[in-house]
Each structure stands twice: as structure tokens, then as C-alpha cells.
Image: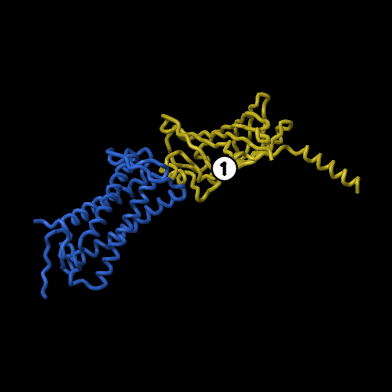
Chain colours: A blue, B yellow
Amino acid sequence: MINITNTKDSYGIVAILLHWIMAILIIGLFVLGVYMVDLDYYSKWYNAAPWWHKSVGMLVFFLLLVRIVWMFTNQRPSPLVSYQRWEILAAKVTHILFYVLLLLVSISGYFITTAKGASIDMFGWFDIPALMHLDKDLAEISGEIHEIAAYVMALLFLLHVCATVKHHFLDKDATLIRILKPNHKEERST
Amino acid sequence: MKVFSILLLAFSLLSTSVMADEYVIDKKGMHASIQFRIMHLGYSWLWGRFNDFEGEFTYDSNDIAASKINVTVNTSSIDTNHAERDKHLRGEEFLDVEKFPKSRFVSTSFSIKENGEGVLLGDFTLRGVTKPIVIYMSRLGEGNDPWGGYRAGFEGTTELTLADYGILKDLGPASQKMDLFFSFEGIKK
């Protein structure tokens, strides 16, 4: 049986899938976002690139909400016994920052499009309507937040990857394994 | 003393009669608009407007040539009914509103024909570039309003070349120029 929910030793399959699906989508969104803002008006992708960016972006936002609910309704796997105190703290800060930045990026992105009442066309299936009108200053600030938060998140992502490499190859601990295998059991010497 | 006050009275009467009537553009009641249109791909007109502006003019139907007008537009108030495009238009590639928050028109001369068609010359400033432009005007009407004031209304149109004002973004061959349309009603001060 594959663990659906988290255990003391490992993440469940839901948390693992949320982690990796969102990781792929967010990396894609970042690359697409950086690419599309410099597109020429006559580029073939001028309209299509933002359309995909917005649809996938809103999908990530919904996955984020599911993930937050899942996080609060599940137990958290305990830190590995080999972790230093500062590592546990650094991981906690990084994770919280990821959530805050993801919320900021998604919400500000939503407002860039909907500031004047336009809705977001989700993959051509349905529209996400505008919730409120923003004046031009707030619309402008939304754009700034979206860009800055995305780049800060990219830096945080690099830190996250470096930490993974350190744990997996230098410390040779189960950090990476735990987010890959839902049934990981930690061996305890005590 | 009496002679002095008579002189003063005469002088003040004289000076008011020499001065043309001063009007303020009715921004409060928004009986004024600044609109523009530009070709999209050569297939249709994209219309937009500036929502925030103010201006004053002097106008005397007995002394048309003495008429003057100046209008200041807050460039960040551009509105094409599309949040993403408006944000783009406010940005550096187009109006660069952070650096150039105001656009101005100050008239240098005005002439009008019997049929109400007129030519207004003046200096137009956009994106920090000032150039002389010609605005083709027509006088729409003037007279008392129902609330005790006096009003005069005009409309005008002109054509601008984007590159003249440092907007170098190439929107395509059909979109090098834009048309501006003004309609305004002044209330006599």
C-alpha cells in the first residue's frame, strides 16, 4: 500500500505529487514569463504565451491552495535526526518563504489581467472572473510584485536545490528520498 | 478724491472690456474628452482616451485671434479598456508616465472662418519632446446654460507621428501615426 497521507518518516503520495507537479509547472511558468515579456508584437507567441502563462499560473494557484490545506491537515514528517539545528531553521524559513512568494506571485498575476474587469480564460474551458477593480497605481504595483517575487523565488529555488544536493551527496541522508518515495522508513539507531 | 475713483472705475471698466473672456474646461461635469485612435495591424481602429486632464482658454468672438488655450494631461490616465494594454502603454516603451507624467498643449495662434472652422497652432509636449502642431478646430456653440453660467464648446483633431515623440516601438506600417480628438466645453469664469 502506498501511503496517501504523510507519516512520521515520509511524505505521502499526495504531498509528493503536489511537490513535483507544482515544481515542474512553476519552473515552466518562470521560464515562459521571462521569455514572453520581451516578445515582439508581431511574434507568433505574443498572444499564446501569456494565455498559457495565465492558465497554468491559475492552475498552480489552485494547487497551492490544495497544498496548503493538505499541509495543515496532515502531520509533517519529523526532521531527520542528523539535521543540525540551523538546517531545520533554514528549511523552515525557506518553505514558509516559498508559500508566501507563491501566494504573492499568483495573486499579483491575477490582478495584472483582471484589474479592469477582464476575466482569465482557463485553457479555453471556463473563465475566472475579475473579483475587484484596481486603480492604475495598484495595477502597476501588482506588476512590480509579480516580477520581484518571481525573481526572489528563483533565487530561493537555487538555494533549495543546493540544499538538496548537499543532503543527498554530502550528508548522504534521506532528504531527497523522502520526497520521492512515499513509503520511506527511517532507520533509527536508538 | 472723487476724480481719482472715477478714473479708477473707468480704468477697470476699460481693462475688463479689453480682456477676452476666460473659460475653464468643464472637468467637473466632464463635458470634455481627449480621445485617440490608432490602427491595429491595419485592420481596425483601437480607441482610447485620457481620463484626467485640465485646461483653460480665453475666447472672445469679437477678437478671435486673441484666443488662447492651454491643456495639461496626466499621461497615466490613459484608458483603452484593457488593463494589460494600459499597463504596457504607461511603460517605458510608450508613454513612460513615471518619467513624463504630464503632456501639455499651449496655443500660439488661432484663426477661425465664418463657418466656425478654425486652425489652432501651438506647442505640444509629449514624453518630454515639444513640437509645434496644427489642430483643426470647429466651434460647436456658445451661450447661457440653464444654471446661470455661460459656456462655449469646441472640438478639434490632429495627427501625431509616434516616432516624433520618441515612441520608437514599431507597431507596424499602418500604426506609425495616431489621431487625437478633443471635445471640450468651457465655463466662463
Q: From this view, report whether residue A52 is shown above or below residue B150.
A: below
Count of numbered marks: 1
Residue for point 40% across, 51% down:
A142
Classify the position of the C terminus of chain B by image quarter.
top right
Residue for point 25% across, 69% down:
A88
Q: From this view, report whether residue A85 is shown above or below residue B96.
A: below
Q: Position of residue B80 (x, y in %)?
A: 46, 38
Callout 1: 10 Å neighbours few (<14), some, many (20+)? some
Q: Position of residue A111 (x, y in %)?
A: 38, 48
Pick whichever, B174 or B188, lies toward us.
B188
Pick whichever, A151 or B53, lies toward us.
B53
Check the image and name the residue furthest to the bottom: A190
Residue B89 seen anywhere in this rendered image of the structure:
yes
Which residue is labeled 1 in the image? B53
Quarter of the rendering containing residue A69: bottom left
Residue for point 11% across, 56% down:
A2
Chain hosting mark 1: B
Check the image and name the residue furthest to the left: A1
Q: Position of residue B93 (x, y in %)?
A: 45, 45
Dot 1: what SS?
strand
Q: Amino acid at mark 1?
A: Phe
Pick whichever, A75 or A106, lies toward us.
A75
Q: Position of residue B117 (x, y in %)?
A: 63, 27
Residue for point 18% across, 72% down:
A82
Quarter of the rendering containing residue A8: bottom left
Residue B125 seen anywhere in this rendered image of the structure:
no
Horizontal relation, residue B87 to residue A150: left or right: right
Horizontal relation, residue B142 to residue B78: left or right: right
